[in-house]
Image (tube, rainbow, N blue to C red):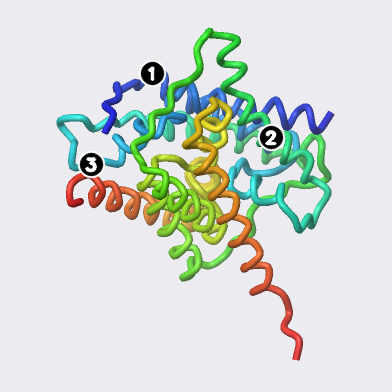
Amino acid sequence: MKILINLALGLLFGAGLIVAGMADPAKVLNFLDVAAIGTTWDPSLMFVLGGAIAVTFAGYRLVLKRQAPLMASQFHLPTPAPIDARILTGAAIFGIGWGLVGLCPGPAFVALGAGNVEAAFFTAAMLAGMWGARLLSLRAAAPRHA
Amino acid sequence: MTPTEFTPLASLVGGGMIGLASVLLMLAFGRVAGISGIAVRVLPPWLDREALGRLAFVLGLVGAPLIWLLATGAMPVASFDAAPLLLVAGGLLVGFGSVWGNGCTSGHGVCGLSRLSIRSLVAVMTFMATAIATVFVMRHLI
């Protein structure tokens, strides 16, 4: 049951990306190209983010009033953490890759499913990068042996 | 570059669907819909028992174009400008950066901003800035 709900929510999320036009890297790059404001600039991405945040902001307010989620014992909210060099570095690196290709993780999987060879190359490299970052951060967090 | 049409209504509706999926994920499992966090935890080491659920969510993303094809008769369009080497470089940077910075456009952008997280706001402003700078360099300087 949990598996099926996860699958359905992934489909809904992916369909949202397709309807929004975000599975097309050209649309993302044309948003990021602010030097083209007045010519080929495409502000659609702001509407995607606006629509998503409006629904999520309102929905979270209702859902988080509950004692617990429906199918888990507790909410797993990100724990408050300082704004340190790590989050700035990670976000900066992520943005450079996003600007090079026009794909972030969600749209990468959707474009992969649409059968794009380019997306396959991108997604394989992305998963390798993700895995490397996770292994590195787990190693950094592990207690050191003397 | 490939010109694209400004689609405010479709993008707003699609954004709403993304938001709905994020809210339902919180309601069902109590988790934020951060795609980088979900995807990387499909890979080992598995520190909890949710890896299969995460895999199902990712497979849902991959399967969405197929459902789209069945419903509309056409695959969604994805046009790439980047050369193969840039695709791989971009993938590595997106993957590493999103996990190192604890989130991407969904985790920080949608879920984090909706929770009014200052940390996520700083992350979003940082990756927007470097992405805009990168596009400027690639399109107007090189």
- Amino acid type of the residue that numbered disc 1 sits on in the rendered structure: Leu
Residue for point 52% across, 59% down: B101
Q: CA distance from mark 2 to mark 1?
A: 26 Å
Residue B9 — which label? 1
Q: In the displayed structure, does residue B137 sit left or right of residue A141?
A: left
**Residue A71 higher or lower than B135, as above or below:** above
Quarter-of-image position of residue A24? top left
Q: CA distance from mark 1 to mark 3?
A: 21 Å
Which residue lies most toward the left here? Answer: A38
- Amino acid type of the residue that numbered disc 2 sits on in the rendered structure: Phe
| Mark 2 surroundings: few (<14), some (14-19) or many (≥20) residues within 10 A | many
Give the secondary structure at mark 1.
helix
**Residue A10 higher or lower than A123, as above or below:** above
**Disc 1 or disc 3, which is closer to the eye?**
3
Q: Which residue is mark 3?
A: A34
Q: Position of residue A78 (x, y in %)?
A: 63, 54
Residues beneath discs 1 and 3 located on the same chain = no
**Disc 2 or disc 1, which is closer to the eye?**
2
Q: Chain of mark 3?
A: A
Residue B57 — which label? 2
